[in-house]
Image: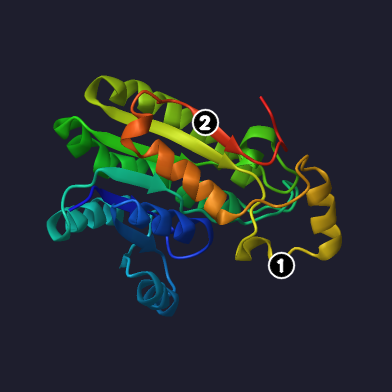
Amino acid sequence: MGRIAIVTGGTRGIGEAICVRLKEHGRTVIASYGGNDAAAQDFTERTGIATQKWDVGDHEQCQDAVAKIATDHGEVDILVNNAGITRDATLMKMTYEQWEEVLRVDLSGCFSMAKAAFPKMRERGWGRIVNVGSVNGQSGQIGQVNYAAAKSGIHGFTKSLAAEGARYGVTANAIAPGYIATDMLATIPDTVMEKIVAQIPMGRLGEPGEIARGVEFLTSDNAGWITGSTLSINGGMHMY
């Protein structure tokens, strides 16, 4: 049996691409999802990858989910915190509920999942944690003070977790995707999309598979001496 990997938000978009890539490279993958049972079933039928339903923003559900996966499949070796939501609005219009919901899922979800998986990784002396941030967590974006704060928090969380895990063989890294061609962008008007693409030096949106390849590398044995890093995959949109 290959290493056991959890990918949160794994049944569509970037998450699906990550799941498929990890499976192709010999991992046993379990994809989490939050609500759409029909979509999850379709994902499993298409990919052969198991799914499990829980709310990553609920601390107890995360603990229970990781324990169930350990019982059903084996202890978790790889954790990819990909699940995220947006509730966009300018600060003047954003409600506290919109702020809190995004922080609960996007940032606290990383904490809860790591809290559940990290102890056994540390005990066994091997683990890979990859947290999916965002270019907008690095540069900021109008209308996304909640999302940018959560994703920026992920980058700091990753560095601190990396420092804690390094001596135990557990690495923690982040990936900061730029604008990726997924369903999440499908509702953006063409005029707005043209302006977004104009800001990308490479002149196009990224593909989910380009993020998945980065995740696959960071979760491999080849990346054993990389920890606390953020891999920016954004077509040159933001560099530092």
Identify which residue, 103 or 14, lies in the foreground.
14
Residue that badge 1 annotates: 187
Which residue corresponds to the image point at 45% horizontal and 41% vertical from the top-left? 131
Q: Secondary structure at mark 1?
A: loop
Which residue corresponds to the image point at 70% horizontal and 34% vertical from the top-left? 238
Instruction: Classify 10 Å Cα crowding around label 2: few (below 14), some (14-19), many (20 and above).
Output: many
Instruction: Classify 10 Å Cα crowding around label 1: few (below 14), some (14-19), many (20 and above).
Output: few
Q: Is 186 placed above or below 144 here? A: below
* Residue 230 image label: 2
> Given this view, does label 1 or label 2 mark the residue nearer the observer?
2
Which residue corresponds to the image point at 44% horizontal and 54% vertical from the top-left? 18
Q: Amino acid at mark 2?
A: Thr
Point out the tag, 1 or 2, that comes first from the N-terminus. Answer: 1
Q: Secondary structure at mark 2?
A: strand
Identify which residue, 115 or 230, lies in the foreground.
230
Identify which residue, 167 or 64, lies in the foreground.
167
Image x and y of residue 141, in percent: 72, 42
Q: Is 32 placed above or below 233 here? A: below
Q: Is 200 placed above or below 123 here? A: below
Q: Is residue 25 left or right of residue 213?
A: left
Q: Amino acid at mark 1?
A: Thr
Gap in Å between the C-alphas at discs 1 and 2?
Answer: 28 Å
Image x and y of residue 58, in percent: 35, 54
- Residues at marks 1 and 2 touching, judged by CB atoms closer than 8 Å: no
Image x and y of residue 180, in percent: 64, 53
